[in-house]
Amino acid sequence: MFGGKIGPMELLVILAIALLIFGPSKLADLGKGLGEGIKNFKASMKDGEEGGEKKS
């Protein structure tokens, strides 16, 4: 457990605790927001790379 790796059992425990704290609706909203944030970050990274190629 303390070897530096997170296994499937640890992920289940974390998910269960998050479900108890936030509830199912808040957890779904949190996941949706996280997914949108990652998508926006990837899009801005891609735009940054394209912008760098145009300047060079």
Image (spheres, grey):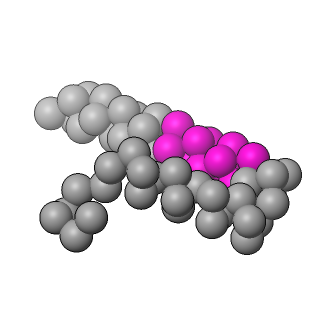
Q: Residue at x 63, y 66 (%)?
A: 17
- Relative side of 32 to 38, left or right: right
Q: Does residue 29 appear in this view?
A: no
Q: Toward the viewer: 37 or 1?
A: 1
Q: Toward the viewer: 48 or 20?
A: 20
In the rendered image, the vertical position of residue 17 relative to residue 29, given as above or below: below
In the rendered image, residue 45, in percent from the top left (x then y), is placed at 36, 41
Q: Residue at x 36, y 33 (%)?
A: 46
In magenta stretch: residue 43 = no
**Magenta stretch secondary structure, dominant:** helix
Occupied quadrant, residue 55: top left
- Relative side of 42 to 48, left or right: right
In magenta stretch: residue 33 = yes
In the rendered image, residue 44, in percent from the top left (x then y), is placed at 44, 41
- Relative side of 41 to 45, left or right: right
Q: Does residue 10 appear in this view?
A: yes
- Relative side of 3 to 35, left or right: left
In the rendered image, the vertical position of residue 12 relative to residue 43, given as above or below: below
**Quarter that holds the C terminus:** top left
Occupied quadrant, residue 40: top right
Q: Residue at x 52, y 37 (%)?
A: 39
**Quarter that holds the N terminus:** bottom left
| Region of the chain picked out in magenta, as a range | 28-40
In the rendered image, residue 4, in percent from the top left (x then y), is placed at 19, 63
Q: Residue at x 42, y 51 (%)?
A: 9
